[in-house]
Amino acid sequence: TPVEIELLRRATALNRAAIERTTQAWEKGMRWRELNRAYHAAAVDLGGFVRDPGAMVWGHPRGADATLTLQTGLEDFEVERGQHVMFDCHGTLDLYCWDGGKTWVVGGEPQGEGKRNLRATAQVAEALISEMKPGRRPSELQAKGRELYRKAGVADAESAVIFFHGLGLSHWDIGETTADWRFEAGMVVPLHIVYPGGERSRAWLEEVVLVTEQGGEPFFGWGYEPLLA
């Protein structure tokens, strides 16, 4: 309903503001748990609520490890200049869930393979959101996303992970992410795109999207390129 959509817009705006405050809080020597606390403090200060073990969802393997992991809340390491931090943040505002975020290049600009992967991810996101119309299915957009990654010249387009779920009073109100349901007008659906890689080459974007007859309407309003310090 229009009221629910406005609640989700407000929740997404809070998440964006909290992420931006967190990147501005970084300084040399800051550790991962300190970065998490900075996000939690920003979210609560803005009127939201986060749950234990925290709002930051992705794990961040060091070095060249391209494994996709979720954080446990026990990890800790120095957040170094040049690392790619994948902000995927959960919380609630007035009982409605927020979700999403994108890649932050700590303290600078992406380089080499990382720059190419982030540019390709931005292009894929923009194209897929324009296709989030009533009647389309997740499988169709997943196939198109990998095709676009191949055209962008990334090393392994088949490793890209693209998925969708619902958002509202629950993060999972559409059901299993493997079900090939149809988009309907008025759905609010987060689009998730992750291109696995090491700490300086991984790429991630999750945009919260309203499905319309004209294509998806993104809620974050900050574009698809990475966050830069």
Image (cartoon, rainbow, N blue to C red):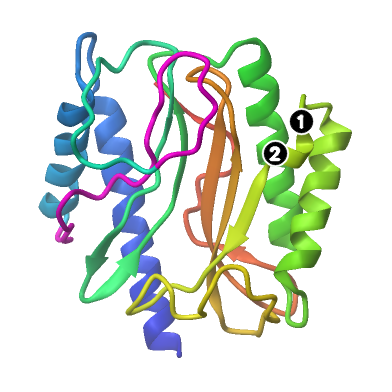
Q: Which residue is mark 2?
A: 159
**Residues in magenta, as a range:** 47-69
The structure residue drawn at horizontal position 43% and vertical position 74%, both measured from the top left corner, is 172
Q: Is residue 37 above or below residue 30?
A: below
Q: Of residues 222 and 122, which is closer to you in this image?
A: 122
Q: Which residue is mark 1?
A: 156
| Residue 146 x %, y % | 79, 46
Q: CA distance from mark 2 to mark 1?
A: 6 Å
User: Is residue 131 visible in this depiction of the protein?
Assistant: no
Q: Of residues 222 and 26, which is closer to you in this image?
A: 26
Contact between marks 2 and 1 (CB within 8 A): the answer is: yes
- The quarter in which the N terminus is drawn is bottom left
- Give the left or right position of residue 90, taking residue 136 as reference: left
| Residue 174 x %, y % | 51, 80
- Give the left or right position of residue 223, taking residue 95 as reference: right
- Give the left or right position of residue 38, taking residue 173 as reference: left
Q: Please tell me in which quadrant of the rendered image residue 158 appears.
A: top right
**Could you tell me the amino acid type at mark 1?**
Asp
| Residue 23 x %, y % | 31, 29
User: For numbered disc 1, what is the local secondary structure?
Assistant: loop
| Residue 20 x %, y % | 32, 37
